[in-house]
Image (tube, rainbow, N blue to C red):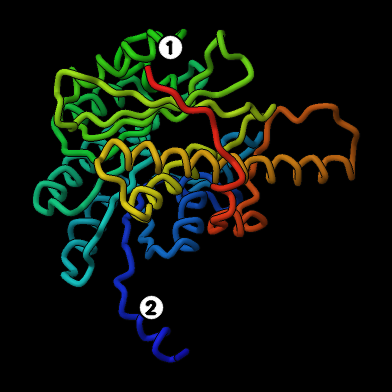
Amino acid sequence: MTGNNNNQEISERTKRVLSIQSHVVHGYVGNKAATFPLQYQGWEVDALNTVQFSNHPGYQFFTGYSSSPNELVDIISKGLIDESELSYDAILTGYISDVEGLRKIGDLISQLCKDSKKIKWLLDPVLGDNGKLYVSEENIKIYQEILRTASIYVVTPNQFEMEVLTNVKITDLPSLRVAFEVFREHYPTIQNVVVTSVELPEHPDVLTSACSTFNNADKNKLYIDIFEVPIIPAKFSGSGDLFSAILLNNLFSYKPVPKNEGELLKSALHRTLIQEDAILKRTYELTLKEFNHTQTIDNLSIVKDLKLIQSKDLLVDESLYSNVSFKCSSI
């Protein structure tokens, strides 16, 4: 019986993803935050690093270098996609700071998705956070052009990025809805949008995450689901990159598959929020213990590194979903 079960598992096709993001030697952001969680959940991950830094910029000092646009494109077009046995189920793109690199990679991935309808592109439009740009303003225009023309399965902006891409200031739930409406109008080829985290003055104790499927049957109606997640009193470097990886897995692995795309997105987002919240809570608790060994602190406002290895069980713990549920509503 054991041999038969092993043969059955081996015969099942392993999901493959090309992940194009930053890389750090120490810590967990970009590909370092995405690769292990995806591998632990059964994915083959081909990681292409747009930059290689010693550690992320949240540290006082770091060093490293960026890959040139031509190097990145050559690796994809002359190497990876020329190998016929490499058939990707998904492409995940994150931090691409170089303007020309973003343009060329956007064009290349757009064409790949046109040539192979089965590839699902999850695009995290990394522009900045907390009111500040991390990249050149030129990157905004390039992202806008990519979003207007490419067939993208899901886009995952944070609040600041959603505001930049729509020119709508999000201050409450009605303005959040307006941002979704403008996004759908400006970027009609996008299938799904998830705004990963929104801080609203009317709900100071929670982060709001919202999602909508644009390719539903009724084009005149816009259905937006929102979840409220209790705030952990800290900022976590790499949490957005981890979110994208977990969401990607949940969109592919959710069982039983919901009856429509909107229900799939809503259910996958809920699972993602539960998993990420559990990992961030454990990271916070473990980091507090580390600090308390050397100094007394009342509050830890910035957590530089996720505790992914110490949280690996949370990536596959099905009991999480029966023990935790976040408030859900629609706007």
Kindly identify the amino acid type of the residue bearing the numbered disc 1.
Leu
Q: Quadrant of residue 330?
A: top left
If you read the primary sequence from the N terminus, does the residue marked by circle 2 or circle 1 appear first? 2
Circle 2: element type = helix
Q: Quadrant of residue 303?
A: top right
**208 or 83: nearer the eye?**
208
**177 or 328: nearer the eye?**
328
C-alpha separation, residue under disc 2 versus residue under disc 1: 45 Å
Left or right: 233, with 201 as reference point? right
From this view, report whether residue 227 is shown above or below residue 25: above
The reply to whether dot 2 and dot 1 touch (C-beta < 8 Å) is: no
Kindly identify the amino acid type of the residue bearing the numbered disc 2.
Glu
Residue 238, image x and y in percent? Answer: 54, 40
Q: Dot 1: within a 10 Å radius of its alpha carbon, few (fewer than 14), some, or many (20 or more) residues? A: some
Left or right: 70, with 217 as reference point? right
Question: How many callouts does the rendering have?
Answer: 2
Q: Which residue is mark 1?
A: 173
At horizontal 19% and vertical 32% (from top left) the residue drawn is 216
Left or right: 202, with 178 as reference point? right
Q: What residue occupies the far left of the structure in this picture?
A: 115
From this view, report whether residue 154 is shown above or below residue 4: above
Residue 117, image x and y in percent? Answer: 13, 51
The image's mark for residue 9 is 2
At horizontal 56% and vertical 9% (from top left) the residue drawn is 201
Residue 83, image x and y in percent? Answer: 19, 69
Residue 299, image x and y in percent? Answer: 79, 27
Left or right: 290, with 152 as reference point? right
The image's mark for residue 281 is none
Q: Quadrant of residue 326?
A: top right
Circle 1: element type = helix
